[in-house]
Image (cartoon, grey):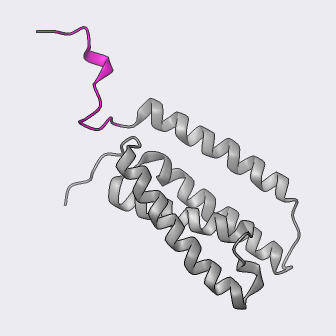
């Protein structure tokens, strides 16, 4: 079994992530009809749906930032869910701030270190014309 290298986002990977995330959001929202903490507009539902989309995108396309943000959104969704069920209380602004910063860092890491897909020009060798 060969390990595929992590890569950058592409329109196809982004479309796949969007489709899976929307599907997961729909399923979680249906559960939210009977169990209010997962209602359609809750932070927990949104974060968990995005985490599912990131996990699927990582498995299929190896998009680097999804390998980082998938677990991040899973943790954030779990924190929001625990807060909604009154296991503990947390300021949502703190959670969203952490998510925003770490998601931004994940995109910077992808931009800097991930392999470019074959359809993207390799900018490191543009001047090398042998």
Q: Quadrant of residue 118?
A: top left
Position in image of residue 52 (x %, y %): 51, 67
The C terminus sits in image quarter? top left
Taking depth in this image into account, of 27 and 72 the one nearest to the observer is 27
Residue at 31% x, 46% y is: 5
| Relative to 50, 61 lies left or right | left
The N terminus sits in image quarter? bottom left
Residue at 38% x, 43% y is: 10
Position in image of residue 76 (x %, y %): 69, 62
Residue 124 counted in the magenta span: yes
Q: Is residue 45 above or below residue 121?
A: below
Residue 89 counted in the magenta span: no
| Relative to 79, 86 lies left or right | right
| Relative to 92, 81 lies left or right | left
What stretch of residues is rendered in magenta? 115-130
Principal SS element in the magenta part? loop
| Relative to 34, 5 lies left or right | left
Q: Is residue 114 above or below residue 30?
A: above
Residue at 51% x, 36% y is: 109
Residue at 56% x, 53% y is: 69
Position in image of residue 44 (x %, y %): 70, 70
Q: For the view shown, which residue lies furthest in the bottom direction?
A: 34
Q: Report how many numbered discs are placed on residues in the image.
A: 0
């Amino acid at each position: 079994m060969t390990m595929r290298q992590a890569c950058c986002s592409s329109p196809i990977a982004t479309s796949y992530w969007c489709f899976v995330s929307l599907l997961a959001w729909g399923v979680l929202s249906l559960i939210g009809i009977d169990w209010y903490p997962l209602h359609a507009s809750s932070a927990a539902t949104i974060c968990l749906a995005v985490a599912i989309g990131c996990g699927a995108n990582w498995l299929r396309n190896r998009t680097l930032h999804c390998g980082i943000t998938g677990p991040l959104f899973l943790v954030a969704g779990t924190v929001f869910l625990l807060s909604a069920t009154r296991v503990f209380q947390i300021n949502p602004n703190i959670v969203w701030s952490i998510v925003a910063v770490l998601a931004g860092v994940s995109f910077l890491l992808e931009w800097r270190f991930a392999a470019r897909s074959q359809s993207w020009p390799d900018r490191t060798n543009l001047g090398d014309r042998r």
